[in-house]
Amino acid sequence: MPTPRIIVDETDMVKLVSEFLHNRDLNISMLSVERETGIINGEFSDDMLFLRQLILDGQWDDVIEFIQPLSSIETFNYTKFQYIIMKHKYLELLCIKSEPSVMQNYDFTVEEVVKCLNNLESVCVSKEDYNNLCLLLTIPKISDHPEYQNWNPSNARVKCFRDVTPIVEKYLTPMDKSKKSLETAEDDRLVQLVLKGMLYESCVEYCQQRATSSETSDEMTFPTLLTNSGFSDADLSLISWLQHIPSDTFSCPFEQKSLNFDIKQLIKPSLEASWSEQILVTPIKPRLFPHSAVPNMRPRSADVMTRSLNPQFDGLSRGLWQGRKEMSASFSGPNALSQSVSIVSGVGVNSASKDPMQMSMDKLFSEGEVVNTQSSVAFEKTSPREKGSQETPQKNKNETEEAKPSPPVATIAPQDKLQDKNNSTPEVGESNSNSELLKEFQRQKQICRDQIEMYDQQREKMLKELMTIENKSSMIDNREEPATKEQTDNKHTVGGGGGSKPCGPVVSQSPKKATPRPLSQTSIIGNQQMSRPKFVEICNLEDVQAIRTVAYHPSGTMFAVGSNSKTLRVCAFPDVSNLSEDHQTFETQTMYTKHKHHKGSIYCVAWSPMGDILATGSNDKTIKMFQYNMDMNSQGPETELSFHDGTVRDIVFMQDTINRSSLLISGGAGDCKIYVTDCETGMPVRAMAGHSGHVYSLHTWGGCMFVSGSADKTARFWDLRASTAITVVPSSTGSAFASVCVDPSGRLLASGHEDGSVMLYDIRGSRGIQSFRPHTGECRTVRFSMNAFYLLTGSYDKKIIMTDMHGDLLRPLPSVVVAEHQDKVIQCRWHPTQLAFTSTSADRQVTCWGLPVV
């Protein structure tokens, strides 16, 4: 007899699991299984499958549009269909309103809720039903209503599809019923198979006992579901034995018996989550129908409320500050201190571990021309770690006690205190359970808190010492100046002539001074204005008119320059590996030049992310794009875009990762709209309106997001999947946004304003951090360095200033002058990989700057 063979398809097993989850309303898990495997339990027509996916993705507006052609059929209950769809959309909007997201436009959310409620009024079954829906507006959270106590978007969407299926099923393409019964798991098939499997194992065990044991028993024992019986899945001994039993045996009469099979139902826990994030987030999308055919991967209404949520943001008090603390802790050294305070009067903390370039930066900030930025913190003068240190002054009395084996009692940050307070009751119950693992975890957590607290106190101590040294240094400098002048006059008198000036500072010879200043330190003070470290001018290029814009190629080997003379140039970036303070400036090497590239001045220039396309914008209201050949330094076919009706002030490229194509974002004067252009076709795909003033600046940091700054005194965050701005940031000083940029992580916005101020804004926390004024003229350019450790600003006051971002953003940040032009500074751009930058100016020059290595 041939060996029996059973073939099991894992696709069918997934369907069994999906049906089991669906029958128990575990729809969050069911939908996750569907999206990860692409397998749906059920045979639907293509139309039904597409409708189902639209509903499960929450594309409510698209659902209405998809079914709208059926409204012409008299027997189709279009009103009831609209009511079911609009009701679920309304519930989700209420959920979003009750859980305001940090990137959500709250006013627009409320507007959408009211609009949806007005649409429901005409399709509600009764006036009472409509009043009940209106009542939901008065409830803080939708889960507070008894009917929606366990509401979540996944269960609601599945229920919505279940409700509309009887209404639309007969009007859409029908399915073969026989095919449906063969390919769909139904009637709790998984539970049936589990029951039969347990019965089979019990029968095998019973037969073995009867065959091998002298004691006979008519009672059968049934294993539990998780009991390992030891049987092989390929063991067919029972079947083989039954096949060898005489046929007469099967004709013996037997007593009919029944099996009591009880299932202990799962007690589902109540879920706590931000359901608005589940509603608004872009879901997993397998490359299979119907997922691939759904037009938008987020609700259309959600696109205009929020951007895609980023879990790495935790707000300012626990996010930006926490991120800075983690960054500071990553530096090697005996103390986890910010590197911005690691240099005290020329002596470095653990300076041996630093690279030469970092030491040069430290010297720049310790000895450079410091700028009083008049910093104004937008909120909380005291950071969380300061609060913790203030609450435990007694801890500093005996710091040696922290070295003892038993962990000391540490002050917990305010957020942690609140958390511990909320969890105080469970901790008592858990301690009674004698869980050693939990106790060890709590002990280690306490030790970590103690260490963090100690590091914070040491940092505060270093900051105070630094401030004390700086104050003493400034007092000594003020006393030294008249003393030096008096010594010089005395020397001239002794010399008899007084006609010649001393060649350098004179060491103090007055007998009144008991301890003369060392010569090297005196030299630094005497020549303070001449010897202050700055970035050196590596190379420059002069034009006949003001040079407005510069942009680096992604490779960093070249940069493009546009000027008022309508000339476009591509220049080679010089070698900055061996810079010295006595470097001789040379002329920039020009690799490509095109005169009269535009009919007007070139206001902006940008490279595509791949570096193969170069685009420029002008006050002739046009944008020009062309392929640039790096090997030949030549341009390919040129495309001219003329849909703007005013000066094109800024352009940025964004990479469409799904379609693997480049998009060009452009903005400026005229209608103040921001246009999105497909670089492959040269056609605008979207016009994004919102600003009421000229768009001065655009910036993107990856993904689908970008930010714009305008003369209407607002900065706006945009998502390519939305048609309107998702967040509006007002100017903290009431001055127009002249320049905007976001750090590479996407958590911090920096903006330059026409009044010379710079604003730092916490994107996740939706609040300003601080505003400071490094310039006396209009701040036209703001840019983060490649690692966001430094912020570069340029202004009409002719100065380029660098701000150290290592420290606590809640405190005034050190700023120094790093370069100067002879006229207004228009634009500055960091090199993609080097600690160097290029600036353009009204003095008709574009200059590359680098920092000499100490």
Image (tube, rainbow, N blue to C red):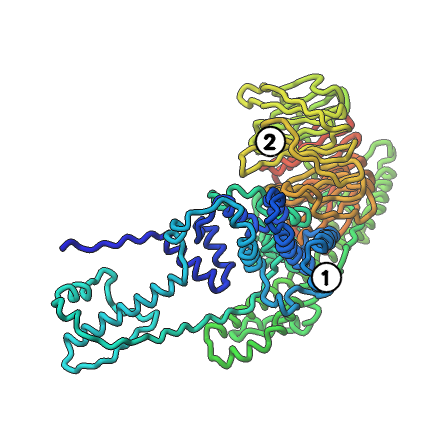
Q: Vertical placement of 729 versus 563: above or below?
A: below
Judging by the rendered image, the residue that carries numbered circle 2 is: 608
Q: Vertical placement of 45 versus 397: above or below?
A: above
Q: CA distance from mark 1 to mark 2?
A: 57 Å
Residue 723's quadrant in the figure? top right
Picture coordinates of residue 499, whole percent (x, y): 86, 31
Q: Residue at x 53, y 72 (%)?
A: 442
Q: Amino acid at mark 2?
A: Ser
Residue 670's quadrant in the figure? top right
Judging by the rendered image, the residue that carries numbered circle 1 is: 127
Picture coordinates of residue 313, whole percent (x, y): 62, 54
Crowd rating for badge 1 (residues with CA inside 10 Å; few <14, some 14–19, many 20+):
few
Q: Residue at x 46, y 61 (%)?
A: 21
Q: Residue at x 54, y 35 (%)?
A: 659
Q: Residue at x 67, y 44 (%)?
A: 742
Question: 514 or 460, which is in the foreground?
Answer: 460
